[in-house]
Image (cartoon, coloured by chain):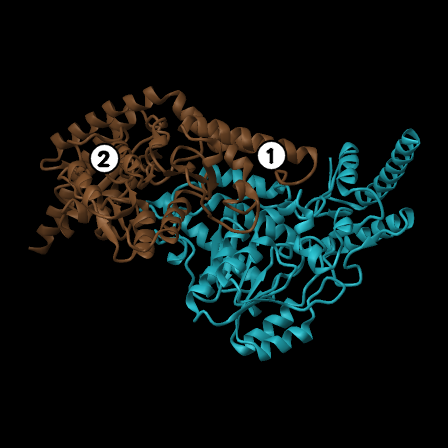
Chain colours: A brown, B cyan
Amino acid sequence: MVYFDNNATTPLGQNALQVYRLALEHDWSNPSSPYRSASRVRAKLEQAREELASILGFHKDQLIFTSGATEANNSVFAHVASNEKKEGQCLLSPFEHPSIIEPAKYWFKDRLTYMPTDDSGRVDLDRTEQLLNTENISLVSLMAANNETGVIQPWQELAKLCLNQGIFFHCDATQWIGKLDSSAFSLCTSFSASAHKFSGPKGLGWLACKEPIQLQLGGQQERESRGGTENYPAIASMLVALKDAIKDLDGLIQGAEWRDQFEQSIINAIPETIVLGKESPRLWNTSMILLPKFNNLSWVGKLDKRGISVSTGSACSAGNVKNTSLVFSMGLSSNEAGRLVRVSSYSDQNESDWQNLALAFTDVFKELKDEASHSSVISL
Amino acid sequence: MVYFDNNATTPLGQNALQVYRLALEHDWSNPSSPYRSASRVRAKLEQAREELASILGFHKDQLIFTSGATEANNSVFAHVASNEKKEGQCLLSPFEHPSIIEPAKYWFKDRLTYMPTDDSGRVDLDRTEQLLNTENISLVSLMAANNETGVIQPWQELAKLCLNQGIFFHCDATQWIGKLDSSAFSLCTSFSASAHKFSGPKGLGWLACKEPIQLQLGGQQERESRGGTENYPAIASMLVALKDAIKDLDGLIQGAEWRDQFEQSIINAIPETIVLGKESPRLWNTSMILLPKFNNLSWVGKLDKRGISVSTGSACSAGNVKNTSLVFSMGLSSNEAGRLVRVSSYSDQNESDWQNLALAFTDVFKELKDEASHSSVISL
């Protein structure tokens, strides 16, 4: 299988698997128990927290392990909405993941304002800054990089503006972590990520937050922020996955060349193909392609038969692509939304995989055209 | 290591580990993605949900995978409190786990009523029934079996009463699942469990709930009850762990004999030792011992040096034993609370382990007495 759906999930890395297995075998004690094997796990857990915090430029006491970014994102909106005077606006980009948009709607109801955007899938920073200066804002939420287009948002600039004005700034960094340098997140009040997007295990992520925050009641774990037995084996695995990614970050980032060549190949071979957000800074691994013809599920199905996995959009909204925030915010028609195919690589994909992907798109285009002309002949 | 702290956590079972590894290798795709390998994981996930639901006597559409019982328990209190008229009482036992008591306090504030209890660590069903008939009750929460004493609560009887009166009945079944028959939970409106208490992986559990309920917003996963990528590899592992436990349930339950012999041995060897809840129906694996002398941390430490892991109480409250709900509700003094030691077995412990445990307690008692007389001689 040639796998190009890494923005949906990644397989567990080899080192991450090895560390997971060892920890499941040796370090499974409950860190809160009162004997030495448990204290050893407690010490390793806190060491892992410290290492991760150091990579992320956050203080270890502000790092809370969660079941993933969805839990972390939910908790931020509940936290801010429960602690403010029910007057301020929640300002967020229209590109956000559903785990941001839905909690924002639930907790802030009609007090939601969407950031102005430009045509390239990016937030318009100048006009957003004007909103910060004129509106009463309780919470600003902007993703680091978009899950569908890979477009990088001006989150660092906006985080600085919020920091200066004392406004809570949350960043959903799920697609950024493990793909780009992670040392600037101290600009944010809080940020979230999921391990399974960077070759770590599923069911694990974090919220880093400068304010005391409550996620799950009923236990002294995570400095009383989140009750529940800590999943040290998975945490150890996640840390190794991230360290592996960071070790080779420059190598990973150079993969943008292969992605760019792929895009040029299919633009040449399939006339009128458009790459969304191509003119913006983007993640090196992602390509959101608006094809000129044929439904995206036909493309996905035919590529699948060739052993290639790609997506119609974010996995969270697959089968429901017309409703994605991306489609709305980039002004695509319903017809265009049905022709979107997302391709996303990670550390396992190499230049030859990208080249084969381009050839496969070209082949599928020919096959779909042949089928269409065949069926139109039959229908004559 | 001879491990007698299974109520805190269990090691991952061999089959559960094997299934986990295979799923991590082969079934890691995002179940929401639109290609065949993902559809296969989706199908396996739904098959696992159906198998588990069948074991639990619940409908598969009512079974929501969570990060554990703590998340599940939290969600029930948020759900009921958000959907009632802020008038009804929340009725719960004083023995509940902190992940029940803390959310109950948070969501119901001064609308909390504790069930009357008897001296044996059990809820008094008759007097609780009177409360049901006379008070305006929105939610009743009773654990199936206590994590500290192993005492089995009359949850089935109370669930039936609530069912008849249309009152929401939640059962924290964390210590029951994998230890006793699980087919009667359809009496409950909702119930929760954690995989790592029955040799499944950490970071996973479930809420089974007959009412539509919202846990995490932002995704269509878990029938829109809980957004976030499903952790199929861990789910597959949990299911195998539970099936393994159930296959040998009669064998496990017979372990009560070994536990009873152990208790008799230490009562004989250490005069004035009391076993809490001994006169009540109890889980076959648990013994909560009130020792006549010496601080429990001294006992735990000396047993630890002999390679035996036991606890001072629930891991969630270790180091804070005076504040456990058990101590309050069974009327123990602060001094007595400091002499509690909990012993809990599971499928890995055999008769000879229990016998060695009894011998170790006897040895430690002698050692502690010797040290005490030695230090009193020195201080003369």
The N terminus of chain B - image quarter: top right
User: Looking at the rendering, which quadrant does residue A163 occupy?
Assistant: top left
Q: Residue furthest left?
A: A380
Above or below, B43 against A268 in this view is below
Instruction: Give the SS element for disc 2.
Output: loop
Name the spot of residue A210 as percent of width and height, x first.
41, 37
User: Which of the two discs, 1 and 2, labels the residue nearer the N terminus?
Assistant: 1
The C terminus of chain B - image quarter: top right
Residue type indicated by callout 2: Val
Name the spot of residue B22 as percent of width and height, x first.
51, 39
Q: Chain of mark 1?
A: A
Name the spot of residue A16 as percent of width and height, x first.
48, 30
Q: Chain of mark 2?
A: A
The mark found on residue B47 in the picture is: none
Count every numbered label the image shows and give the total: 2
User: Looking at the rendering, which quadrant does residue B127 occupy?
Assistant: bottom right
Same-chain status of marks 1 and 2: yes
According to the picture, the residue beneath numbered tag 2 turns out to be: A151
Residue A338 visible: no
Q: In this rendered view, identify the residue nearer to me: A58 or A146.
A: A58
Name the spot of residue A278 as percent of width and height, x first.
17, 32
Q: In this rendered view, identify the residue nearer to me: A28 or A128.
A: A128
- Crowdedness of circle 2 by 10 Å Cα count: few (<14), some, many (20+)? many
Residue type indicated by callout 1: Arg
Left or right? Give the position of B119 relative to A64: right
According to the picture, the residue beneath numbered tag 1 turns out to be: A42
Which mark lies nearer to you, 1 or 2?
1
Residue A252 visible: yes
Left or right? Give the position of A188 relative to B196: left
Left or right? Give the position of A12 relative to A376: right
Instruction: Give the SS element for disc 1.
Output: helix
